[in-house]
Every structure is written in C-alpha cells, then in structure tokens.
Amino acid sequence: MDSNDFNLGYEEVYNDRLGETKSMITLATLLDSLDQGAEGVRYNAVMRGAYENAEKANPSGLPSSTPDVTLVSSVIRSNVKLMIYNIIEYSVTNLMQAIYDRVKDEGCGYAEVSEKLQSIWHHTQMYNGLSDPKASNSTAESISKRLLDHAVKNNVLQFSVRNTIAGGNLDADKILKLFDDHGISIHDDIANCKRDEIKSELKDIKNRRNDLAHGSISFAEASNQVTTSELAELVNHVDSFLMQLRKDVSTYLNAGEYRRGMTESEEG
C-alpha cells in the first residue's frame, strides 16, 4: 500500500503490520526449506543446536522438546490468517473513523450530513438505547425525543465505529454493505468481488479467525493444507482490496459526499 497517495492517518501502522505478516510467511518458507534439506542443512540439526543454547539461557527448563517442523510451520500459517484478518478489521475501522472524524471536525449537524449518515446515526443511537435489558416503552419515547431535539438543534453528530462495525465478522459482503450504508461508491473491480475470488478468500479468513478464536480448531489444523506461496498471494490480494477501499473513501471525503447535497436539501 502506497501511503503517499491518500494519507488518512493509519497507513504507517498498516504497512508495519503488513510487513510483519509477510515476515511470518517467509519464516514458514524457511522452515519448509530446512525440513527438505536445503543446501544440506536439516531443520532438526539446526533446532537441536538452538535448543541447547536456549536451555543454557533458561536454567528452569523449556516447556517442551524440540517441536516438529510440520507443527511449527502449520501454527505459523494459522497465525498468518489471524494477522491478515486483523489487518482487514484495522483498515476498515480506520476508514470509517476517517469519515466520522471529518464530520466532527467540520461540525456537521443532522441537517448537514447525507441521508445515509442520518440513517446510520439514528439507527445506532436507537439500538444502543434499546439494547439495555431495562429498556421499556418509556425508554423508546425518551430516546426518540432526545434524538429529535438533537436534530432540531442541529448539534454536531457523533459516530462510533464500535457501533457500526461488527468486530470479528468482516468479510467481503459485510464490508461492501458497510460502505454502501455510508453512501461510498465502490470501484467496479471491488464490487465484482461479491462473485469472484476475493469473496471466497475473505470469507475463509473470517471463518478461520473465528474458528481459532473460539477454539473449535487447533492452530496446527487450521492452515496445514495451505502453502506459503498461496499465503503470499492471499496477502497481495487482500492488500489490493484494501488499497482500493482506501482510494474510494478518499474520493468520498474529497468530494464531500458525506454532506447533504443540494438535491437532497431541495427535496427536504
């Protein structure tokens, strides 16, 4: 991702995390090469020497014997899937936050934001208030009055990504719907991901992340059939996907599409 084109404030951390993920793929590749006896060097021989040094540095002992290379490599592959998902959620969260920060910085009230953002604000405010187990009919009336007063006074709107993004469940369909809900025009190539390879890839990443988080599958099992070359290609696909989303958000912000347009004002 080239952070020089559309700097929204999160690019440096994004690139750091992307680099960390690629380093893990490289590590898994090196382990595979050692296990296959690259240039006469075997994994077990290297690890035995490393294990002896580690024992000297840890007088109380190590928690296990030298791990099997297949196990280690599989665990690394599973961690890569987790890291990729974290990059996706981090990116989408920051893209949404960039929109909310712009609304706040420009002091936009209810009458000044697009109908899409009005709907999001109203829905999240109502949902948060009514999600309280003690909520009643009077609670709904109270919330409605408060929101109406806020809108009439045209006070600055406050949005929270915590209320608009379902953590742990982002895939291509949910991301595209989130963008559409905010009124962000999606690039044609990205829109097509509903039907092509990236949809399947992002869904698998999300499912693997949830399986690992809930303990329904082990780290050794989650990605033991995935090659490091496939992981490297996956990272590139996800990076391209997120880069295009970032460009779409930048276009959205630069065009002021988060604000209520002249046509909307006349219709209102």
Image (cartoon, rainbow, N blue to C red):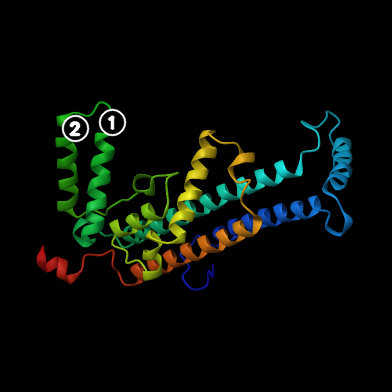
Looking at the image, residue 62 lies above or below residue 263: above
Return the x and y of residue 255 as percentages of the image width and height.
31, 72
**Secondary element at image label 2:** helix
Return the x and y of residue 86 as percentages of the image width and height.
52, 50
Answer with left or right where residue 229 lies relative to residue 51: left
Q: Nearer the viewer, residue 156 or 133?
A: 133
Answer with left or right where residue 190 lies relative to residue 84: left
Answer with left or right where residue 74 lies relative to residue 257: right
Answer with left or right where residue 62 lies relative to residue 118: right
**Secondary element at image label 1:** loop
Residue wearing tag 1? 132
Instruction: Give the residue drawn at x 45%, y 50%.
Output: 203
Residue type, numbered disc 2: Thr
Query: Label 2 to label 1, Cα distance in Å?
Result: 9 Å
Marker disc for residue 54: none
Return the x and y of residue 115 as percentages of the image width and height.
20, 59
Residue type, numbered disc 1: Asp
Residue 182 quadrant:
bottom left
Return the x and y of residue 156 as percentages of the image width and height.
26, 54
Q: Say whether marks 2 and 1 touch (CB < 8 Å).
A: yes
Residue wearing tag 2? 139
